[in-house]
């Protein structure tokens, strides 16, 4: 099989590595890819939003399966374009990717189908939002409606902060047109857990759990980022909680999408809060998480191509999804100044230390191959993942491996998975 992966981050590197293990695959292409993906796939310089060029390339190279990993092209309808051109594609169509693309849509869906989530109101008018906030309980959460690189969420502790937040989102449009509509929701407390799942339109099979660390600094300080590190599994995601989620969240979500005439095929990522009132949905994503994929996929035992084909064909009920009984930790090495301002083009060293080790992974996110060698090319540069018998061992190994890679301005969080070990 010829496979085309669309995207070029750490998640796509993790997907490419899983795809490379499949016996069914002869050739992997990645558009646009990065320096790490280039070691296992042929990277082609086509951007993820260049739909016509991607479809033309897929026809030309006789691609048997296209895998779309990123939110923007999914929400924009890349899977629809591939299908219209006769190319099999893994991922939701635009009418289902809206589950991630619009927070107002997903909140209304949860309300209509009684799926537990924070209480909320939606606004398309700043004055109405401001009037509502006057009498609302603080803290409160403001969310720009559309995609905002995971940054369109403001947690406001006081009325003043909330008013300033309305200005940021709806008037100053700091998150662009995502701020034309805004969701205001109840602040929930509890432990967060991410659960990824494969879905074929009617059947859902969940993967092992994971947890992200979204803030830039140690101790959950600093700005929100795309994710600074993950671990899997989450010890707080017990069998009992899983049973509740299957019953009240996962199956109802898939059934709701089907009932709305928007059958979801692909990956649903459930961002959950384990509250005192039970598990509730924080957010849905319509794709693998980044860097959740970097700790979940190395633990998956199935042939990923077989699972993806079952999602497309509607035969997921026949798949026995299996994960190794171990743990994984991913620590992101970022460029100093991320997520605001950072430099690119710093020469990187130490990659050879990962050669020949099947329990250590260096997933490239923002890297580029140049004549001087591999250089940094983004805020999140690489995700260093290690697997181990348990979280403690995986964590120690991952942090040891962060020392192998070096570049000017390298920074990371030092507490990925630390709170779990203390608890
Ligand atoms: P989201 O992009 O919706 O996952 O939001 C980003 C982060 O904001 C989440 O991972 C949570 O830590 C936090 N968050 C979002 N919604 C809420 C909420 N209703 N209550 C408390 N924290 C929230
Ligand atoms: N790590 C969070 C996300 O992929 O949205």
Image: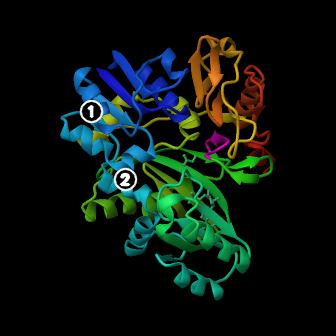
Secondary structure under tag 2 reads helix
Membership of 227 in magenta stretch: yes
The residue tagged 2 is 97
Q: How is the image coloured?
A: rainbow
Q: Nearer the viewer, residue 338 or 416?
A: 338
Task: Kindly identify the residue that appears in the image at 75 percent across and 22 percent down.
Answer: 406
Residue located 27% across and 33% down the image: 55
Q: Which residues are magenta?
A: 226-233
Q: Is residue 282 visible in this depiction of the protein?
A: yes
The label nearer to you, 2 versus 1, is 1
- Quarter location, residue 349: top right
Q: Earlier in the sequence, mark 2 or mark 1?
A: 1
Q: Quadrant of residue 369?
A: top right
Say which residue appears at 52% left-offset and 29% top-offset: 14
Q: Position of residue 347 (x, y in %)?
A: 70, 19
Check the image and name the residue furthest to the front: 172
Asked whether 19 or 247 is in front, the reply is: 19
Query: Image quadrant for the N terminus?
Result: top left
Side of 80 where 175 appears, left or right: right
Bin the neighbour count of mark 1 within 10 Å (Cα to Cα): few under 14, some 14-19, many 20 and up: many
Looking at the rendering, which quadrant does residue 345 occupy? top right
Q: Secondary structure at mark 1?
A: helix
**Is residue 187 something one can see in this rendering?**
no
Mark number displayed over residue 352 = none
Residue for point 28% across, 58% down: 262
| Residue at the spot of label 1 | 55
Q: In the picture shown, does residue 125 fall above or below 248?
A: below
């Amino acid at each position: 099989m010829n496979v085309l992966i669309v995207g070029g981050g750490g998640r796509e590197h993790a997907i490419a590595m899983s795809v490379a293990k499949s016996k069914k695959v002869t050739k992997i292409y990645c558009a646009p890819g990065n320096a790490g993906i280039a070691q296992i796939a042929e990277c082609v310089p086509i951007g993820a939003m260049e739909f016509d060029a991607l479809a033309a390339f897929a026809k030309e190279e006789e691609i048997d399966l296209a895998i779309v990993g990123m939110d923007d092209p999914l929400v924009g309808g890349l899977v629809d374009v591939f299908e219209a051109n006769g190319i099999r594609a893994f991922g939701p169509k635009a009418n289902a990717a809206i589950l991630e693309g619009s927070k107002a849509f997903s909140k209304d869906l949860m309300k209509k189908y009684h799926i537990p989530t924070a209480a909320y109101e939606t606004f398309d008018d700043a004055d109405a939002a401001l009037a509502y906030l006057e009498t609302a309980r603080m803290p409160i959460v403001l969310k720009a409606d559309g995609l905002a690189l995971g940054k369109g969420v403001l947690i406001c502790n006081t009325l003043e902060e909330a008013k300033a937040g309305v200005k940021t989102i709806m008037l100053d449009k700091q998150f662009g047109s995502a701020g034309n509509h805004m969701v205001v929701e109840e602040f929930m407390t509890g432990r967060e857990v991410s659960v990824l799942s494969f879905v074929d339109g009617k059947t859902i099979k969940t993967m092992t759990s994971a947890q992200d660390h979204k803030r830039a600094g140690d101790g959950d300080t600093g700005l929100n980022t795309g994710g600074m590190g993950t671990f899997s599994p989450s010890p707080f995601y017990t069998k009992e909680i899983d049973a509740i989620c299957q019953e009240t969240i996962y199956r109802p979500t898939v059934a709701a999408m089907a009932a709305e005439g928007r059958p979801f095929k692909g990956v649903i990522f459930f961002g959950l809060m384990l509250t005192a009132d039970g598990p509730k949905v924080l957010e849905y994503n319509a794709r693998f998480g980044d860097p959740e994929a970097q700790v979940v996929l190395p633990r998956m035992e199935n042939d990923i191509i077989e699972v993806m084909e079952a999602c497309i064909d509607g035969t997921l009920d026949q798949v026995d999804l299996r994960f190794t009984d171990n743990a994984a930790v991913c620590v992101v090495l970022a460029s100093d100044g991320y997520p605001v301002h950072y430099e690119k083009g710093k020469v990187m060293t130490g990659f050879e230390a990962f050669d020949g080790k099947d329990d250590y992974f260096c997933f490239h996110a923002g890297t580029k191959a140049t004549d001087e060698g591999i250089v940094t090319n983004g805020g999140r540069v690489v995700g260093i993942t290690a697997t181990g018998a348990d979280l403690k061992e995986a964590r120690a190994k991952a942090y040891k491996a962060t020392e192998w890679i070096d570049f000017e301005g390298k920074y990371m969080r030092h507490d990925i998975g630390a709170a779990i070990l203390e608890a």
